[in-house]
Image: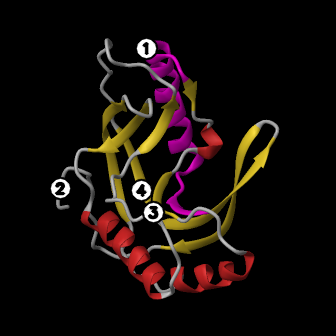
Amino acid sequence: MFFALWPSSAVATELATVGRVLHEICGGHCTRSETIHLTLAFLGEVEVERVDDLLNLAGQVRVHAFSLNLTRLGWWPRNRIVWAAPEKAPVELVRLTDELRHYLGCAGVSFDAKPFVPHITLLRKGHCQDHPLPSVDVKWHAEDFVLVRSVSSKSGAAYEVVGRWPLLLGDKFSSVGSEAG
């Protein structure tokens, strides 16, 4: 299970298109449009009896909605992931992740505590070492976050949204990823 930002279908389609362009350059396997997301906190295996705790703690998060301006593409050679990211994480994205981690810790729920590096995986098993990556400019307005369960099947992993929580609306927004963070 994991907490994530889940894009609108229009943003997911736009990111999947970028993924197909990257596939032409780097090879590998494109992330399916319906599974594109930005992980906020990876939980791993969660006991069924703890799911209600997760649903309750997520409801305590109070962070304003924000916009991501995805302007960076990159490649991690070790795990061969090709990704899109903001130049700098909006302050609200960092707050969202920090609050989730705080509540998870208070509830005794284990999670991957590695430093948060906001990115959207667009391609797996890519090889981009000898290829310059194109420019990108995808705008994503985050108005909610979700809890997701990964379900394995013959055709690969499918994601099931278990819970969804709105971010606060108002006139306080970090409108682009290159601002405060």
The nearer-to-camera label among 3 and 2 is 3
- The three-letter code of the residue at mark 2 reads Glu
Residue 168 in view in this figure: no
Q: CA distance from mark 2 to mark 4?
A: 15 Å
- Do the residues under discs 3 and 2 have CB atoms within 8 angstroms? no
Query: Residue at coordinates 49% horizontally, 28% vertically from top-left?
Result: 19
Residue 151 in the magenta stretch? The answer is: no
Q: Quadrant of residue 173?
A: bottom left
Q: Nearer the viewer, residue 61 or 7?
A: 61
Q: Secondary structure at mark 3?
A: loop
Q: Secondary structure at mark 4?
A: strand
- In this rendering, the answer to whether 181 lies above or below 14 is below
Name the spot of residue 134 as percent of width and height, x first: 32, 21
Sooner in the amino-acid sequence: mark 2 or mark 1: 1
- Magenta residues, as a range? 1-28
Sooner in the amino-acid sequence: mark 3 or mark 2: 3
Query: Residue at coordinates 33% horizontally, 32% vertically from top-left?
Result: 74
Q: Quadrant of residue 137?
A: top left
121 lies left or right of 157? left
Quickly name the residue at label 4. Answer: 141
Residue 179, label in figure: 2
Quickly name the residue at label 1. Answer: 25
Q: CA distance from mark 3 to mark 2?
A: 27 Å
Query: Residue at coordinates 50% horizontally, 43% vertically from top-left?
Result: 11
